[in-house]
Amino acid sequence: MAKLTVKDVELTGKKVLVRVDFNVPLKDGVITNDNRITAALPTINYILEQGGRAILFSHLGRVKEEADKAGKSLAPVAKALSEKLGKEVVFTGTTRGAELEAAIDALKDGEILLVENTRFEDIDGKKESKNDPELGKYWAGLGDGIFVNDAFGTAHRAHASNVGISANVDKAVAGFLLENEIAYIQEAVEAPVRPFVAILGGSKVSDKIGVIENLLSKADKVIIGGGMTYTFLKAQGIEIGDSLVEADKLDIAKELLAKADGKLILPVDSKEANAFAGYTEIKDTEGDAIDPGFLGLDIGPKSIAKFDAELTGAKTVVWNGPMGVFENPDFQAGTIGVMDSIVKQPGVKSIIGGGDSAAAAINLGYAEKFSWISTGGGASMELLEGKVLPGLASLTDK
């Protein structure tokens, strides 16, 4: 990666500003999934071991007005992080002011402080999410000129807590998590070991037009599944019953199919039901057409076999988007089948691009079988699309 990393700067005795992604799910003040906290530990531990004084910034959810602050404090995260590190995490519950400044000044080498939810600054004019220059400069002034960005999940956004701080420090560098995310995803797309197969699922073609176009120029094959399948089928004049369709994207689907020159691989059957919820009948279609009064909610067994054949011998696989409504056990088979096909390939470099795909792999017990599971859904999508991420671009070049 052509950017400085945390290993390229002197940290001892320095107040080191760190952007992490602690946007974790909370229920009644209890963290229900702490994967993002765990993912940040290598960078945090490294800074502390080097004698740095770590000052962490993160957002949690969306905050537009005062009422939105309820249940959005990072206090539970500070407690969980303290337990994982085995040491105190100072938390003042503020995003600026004398109390925060005094707490930072009181830090000793190897100690850590977590700033309150950066999105609390959005109540008055969206200062965080609109990258208010004054706020970025203020936060940058809390440290000693070093900023470590380890929040891949927000790298596709120009916020005060990443781009704003970067613009006002001597050195803005990547943490280990951000470095790994870029290495796995970007290198898989730009310099893959071939054959390179991309798998795209999810509900909407509109969400993935740019990704499909970019991957068609990079990958040897692009497999399509999920709800967006039916827009592609309808574009070919195939009956789709009551399945999800984006009628305004049919022409784009036709264009992508023509441009693909055989690279775009579509399902050949579906698992269909007579309703999305409260259905009374489920069956596999005979071919790719959906029966009247039914809708496709997963790929069928013939498609699972076809995709398995297409994946045979693959050395690089990037997957973003489940094959069906995987949260429902009746429609998990397609997603599980694709995961089985990916992980059994000898020597394959397998990467999940965050979001629902990551949730599927984790919830269905496949997490340890993949080479890399991204922590950022939106950021990984933009990287797959070939876009420049502001959070990455703002870091100091080597």
Image (tube, rainbow, N blue to C red):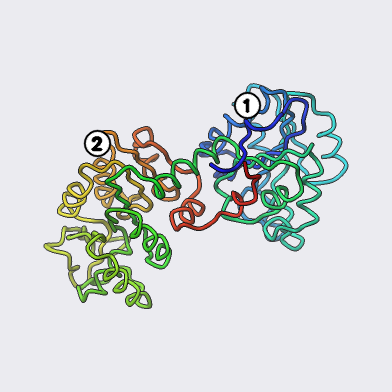
The residue most toward the left is 286
Labelled pair 2, 1 in contact (Cβ < 8 Å): no
Near-viewer residue (195 or 385)? 195
At label 1, the amino acid type is Tyr
Residue at 32% of width from left, 52% of height from top? 198
- 73 sits to left or right of 183: right
Residue at 82% of width from left, 40% of height from top? 100
Q: Quadrant of residue 114?
A: top right
Judge whether 188 appears above or below 87 on screen. Answer: below
Q: Quadrant of residue 143?
A: top right
Q: Secondary structure at mark 2?
A: loop
* Tag shown at residue 344: 2
- 311 sits to left or right of 115: left
At label 2, the amino acid type is Lys
Provide residue 239's location: percent of width, then percent of height.
20, 73
Near-viewer residue (172 or 155)? 172
Quote the CA–CA distance across marks 2 and 1: 34 Å
Give the labeled residue for mark 1: 46
Q: Secondary structure at mark 1?
A: helix
